[in-house]
Image (cartoon, helix red, strand yellow):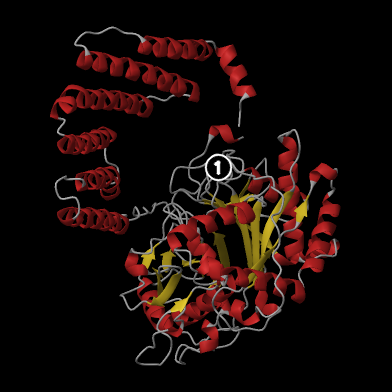
Amino acid sequence: MSYCVNCGVELDATASFCPLCHTPVLNPGQPVDEHAPKPFPTQRGEVAPASKRELALLITAMLASVAVCCGVLNLFLNQQRPWSLYVIGAAVMLWIWFVPPLLARGMHLLLRLLLDVAAVAIYVFLISVDLDGRSWFCGLALPIILWGGAILLLLGLVLRVYRRSVLTSVTILIGSVGVLLFGVEFFLDRWLSGSWEPSWSVVVLAVCAGLTIPLLVIRRVPSLREEVRRRFHL
Amino acid sequence: MAKDRRGGKPEWYPLDNAGVLYSAIQKENYSAIYRFSAVMAAPVDPDALQRAVERTMPRFPSFAVRIKRGAFWHYFEPNHAAGPFVKPDIANPCQPVRFQEDNGWLVRFYYYETRISLEVFHAVSDGAGALVFFKTLLAVYLRELGHIIPNTCGILDVDEPPRPEEREDAYERYATVKARRSGLEKKAYPNTGTPEPFYTLNVTMGFLPVDQLKARAKGYGVSITEYLTAVLLKVIVDKQHRERPRREKPVALAIPINLRAWFPSETLRNFILTVRPCIDPSLGEYTFAEVVSQVHHFLRLNINRQQMQALLTGNVKFTTNRLLQIVPIVLKNPVMALGYRLSGVRPYSGTYTNPGPFPVPEEMAPHIRRMEVILGQATNPRVHCASISYGNTMEITFAGTLQETDTERDFFRFLVREGIPVKVESNRTVRSELMF
């Protein structure tokens, strides 16, 4: 039998190291028995992921019920306007946001974000149908939604794929807000006046840049980074 | 309550006080599971074990249940599905349970070489109830192999029908006095570490001779449970001290107490309460003898019938509160889980449970080499400690979902320094260069 030289405990004949201090067993008098069965099985068991179908069904039933009730009510109340489209659109949007991720576990982030953006576009489209606003939907709302979606996609991929610190994440987030608003003004200007004259969004962009520059400096300088880590540790 | 057509017994029944809590804190990656194992003298015959399970389960209807979600509370109903089936053992025991999977079974049976293991979801039963079930199962298994085992030492007769007293909610029966709820305790040193990836449970077992352990405990004038509690407290206090925090937090353990000794009951369901021995290092340094003395006096002072009855009444009153009852389960469970975090996790540095000796009939003793117990994962990456003795072997298990081995290493080293020989086994297979 072997004993751990650090812990003084007797070890199993099959143990190649002490499980308490991880010191390897080196006993020329009694080498590690590699043929005897280990004290515990080595085959790992897998836990089945918990099913979310019930919750998905419940959410679907609730949203469908709300949509149908409002749709039917629209036939009798204020018939001249399709006001129920607001509620139905919201129900569809919420369904797309919450139910597919529950049913398809491990859904790719890209696909999920695409679906979410499409859901917002559908909702706004339904609103534009009621307000007879095909022109503002195509000229303003859709480009802004797509622009926001593209930034969100990029943000999601960057934050998910690369190992990042809290500092980097905050820097990227602030930068994204600046870029988003810059684009929003571009689309607004183009739709309202047909030309692009950057004004308030440049101020926002400058503020965002001002906020990110010190963060970038801290991120790049190891001594500063360490100092921040020490002072703000949780 | 619906009636069963055959026996006229209730078809379903609500969870007991502890069961309500364990079902509320159930998550996708956490279940309150524990395991008892018996290492037999001969390799396990899986067919005989399966036959034994099939003969034993009908005698224990409180284990042959599935858990269902009602609008306001979970409840149990008899499980008539096929199984449970014995399975080859796995390296990562006490996996979370899925209420909808595995035919809804809340007990699992495993075999590996000479080891038979039983895993139980804590809402079904506590350790004392599960040990009655396990002992009966082992007796039936040995009978299946041709041995003659009498129904003594707590083994139930599987040919008898189950008795209603075995399924009683003992908490409710004894919740008859003025209630008292303990307020929120101070936050304790959490003793957490680096979490392992899901699902890994690192198990380290130590085997000690009971006579030497008893002699050592007797030297301090305390019981084995008190002695081991003090050792665990002392090593955690020292660990915190080595980390040099700005202000040392109290170190406290949750010690489950089997209430059957104070309140006669034959229930095989939950009937436990926990006590909280605590050492506050901010008051100054404690020698080991002082820690032992603190633990001894704390347990003797606080474990008494009146105090425990007031506490259990308080817990029962909490679940019978009209306002709380009408809150839907989807809202109630997160609140109860938060309550558990604040009152069941935050004020503790760990858990230590000692179901005590495992007496068996003389005819059965030669077939069992030793007993083992594993307290499953905690809600955060910390180790749980549990012990059980059989014959002259005391088995102590540290199990947790953390990478570090500091607590168990210091604990067993301490016992070795006290002059008690310890043999260690573990399911850890990866040697980390960073560990020492």
Q: Would residue B38 be visible to someone looking at this image? A: no
**Identity, as a three-letter code, of the amino acid under mark 1:** Phe
Would you say A216 lies left or right of B224 here?
left
Work out whether residue B231 or residue A140 is closer to the camera in this orientation and state it.
A140
Residue A227: give x, y in percent of width and height.
62, 17
Work out whether residue B391 or residue B270 is closer to the camera in this orientation and state it.
B270
Would you say A232 lies left or right of B181 here?
left
Residue A194 vertical position relative to residue B222 in the rendered view, above or below = above
Q: For the point 69% across and 55% down, which residue is it?
A: B184
Residue B82 position by quadrant: bottom left
Residue A134 position by quadrant: top left
Q: For the point 85% across and 65% down, which residue is it?
A: B221
Residue B150 vertical position relative to residue A66 in the rendered view, above or below = below
Q: For the point 56% across and 32% down, which residue is it?
A: B434
Residue under numbered circle 1: A17
Residue B399: give x, y in percent of width and height.
56, 53
